[in-house]
């Protein structure tokens, strides 16, 4: 009897924790933060978010920079030198962060670091970016706290070849089914809510292949409910506290 009760409790707790919350570009929609800022990473950690996502580019002189867009204040990061960018500030007053700074901050926190490598125009530069990212993560002792995501098919393969075995890597671009990705041995799909609503069968398909499903950017209650009901594994959102409240209900 005790054993049955124990198993029932285990299965209940698994069901209750089916979804994990990932803050999209950190928890930026909050006092004093900005997208992809150090503050947004600290805030994500402070609410106990499972993970916090941020975007990474590499400059022409090989400095890894955290920013979403290809440009910052009109300067294209890929073709700029770090000197052109290093005095620039985010709209919360922080300096534009380097990956080095972001990871140093991450070392003191618990939240998982969801690192998006941006697809670079110059594929040789992207390859170098992948090498430098993986090397830096290793140097900082963060190999067991990092997950990689990317829209770049080539970049995904490079990260897979470079990262410590077992490091989760997810594909963002949305055009490949889980079966089409299976031979690359990646952790799963990380697709937009639009793509997943068009292909809801990909959730079971991924799970049957031992892959996980992350969905972005899930901000409305309607989309959150859809993800929860359909059993996706991770939900990436700009409204993490709303999602946490829903998951506790
Ligand atoms: Mg991103």
Image: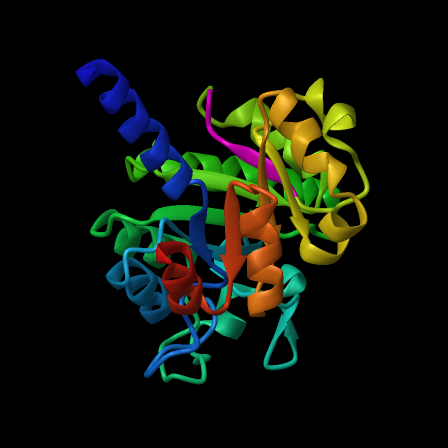
Residue 135: image location, x then y, percent: 43, 35
The residue shown at (41%, 37%) is: 15
Residue found 34% across the figure and 51% down from its top: 103
20 or 221: nearer the eye? 221
- The answer to whether one can see residue 234 in this image is yes
Side of 104 where 112 appears, left or right: right
In the picture, measured across the screen, residue 199 lies left or right of residue 215, that is right
Tell me, yes or no, whether the highlighted magenta stretch contains residue 168: yes
Q: Residue 64 vs residue 109: left or right?
A: right
Q: Is residue 37 above or below residue 216?
A: below
Position of residue 219 relative to residue 196, above or below, is below
Question: The N terminus appears in which quarter of the rendering?
Answer: top left
The location of residue 146, given as percent across then percent down, is 41, 39
Picture quadrant of residue 34: bottom left
Camera-side residue of 247 and 30:
247
| Residue at left offset 45%, top offset 54% | 22
Q: Is residue 62 above or below residue 29?
A: above
Q: For the C terminus, which image quadrant?
A: bottom left
The residues colored magenta run: 166-171
Image spot of residue 69 (x, y percent):
63, 68
């Amino acid at each position: 009897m005790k054993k049955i009760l124990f198993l029932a409790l285990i299965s209940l707790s698994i069901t209750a924790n089916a979804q994990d919350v990932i803050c999209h570009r950190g928890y930026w929609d909050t006092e004093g933060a900005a997208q992809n800022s150090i503050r947004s990473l600290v805030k994500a950690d402070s609410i106990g978010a499972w993970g916090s996502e941020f975007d990474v580019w590499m400059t022409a002189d090989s400095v890894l920079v955290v920013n979403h867009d290809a440009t910052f204040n009109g300067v294209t990061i890929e073709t700029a030198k770090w000197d052109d960018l290093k005095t620039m500030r985010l709209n919360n007053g922080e300096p534009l962060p380097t990956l080095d700074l972001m990871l140093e901050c991450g070392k003191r926190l618990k939240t998982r670091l969801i690192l998006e490598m941006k697809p670079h125009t110059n594929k040789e530069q992207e390859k170098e970016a992948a090498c430098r990212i993986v090397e830096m993560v290793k140097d900082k002792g963060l190999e067991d706290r990092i997950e990689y995501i990317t829209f770049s098919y080539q970049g995904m393969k490079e990260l897979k070849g470079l990262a410590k075995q077992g490091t989760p890597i997810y594909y963002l671009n949305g055009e490949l089914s889980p079966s089409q990705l299976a031979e690359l041995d990646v952790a799963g799909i990380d697709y937009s809510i639009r793509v997943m609503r068009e292909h809801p069968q990909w959730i079971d398909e991924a799970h049957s292949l031992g892959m996980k499903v992350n969905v972005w950017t899930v901000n409305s209650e309607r989309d959150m409910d859809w993800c929860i009901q359909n059993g996706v594994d991770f939900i990436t959102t700009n409204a993490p506290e709303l999602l946490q409240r829903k998951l506790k209900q």
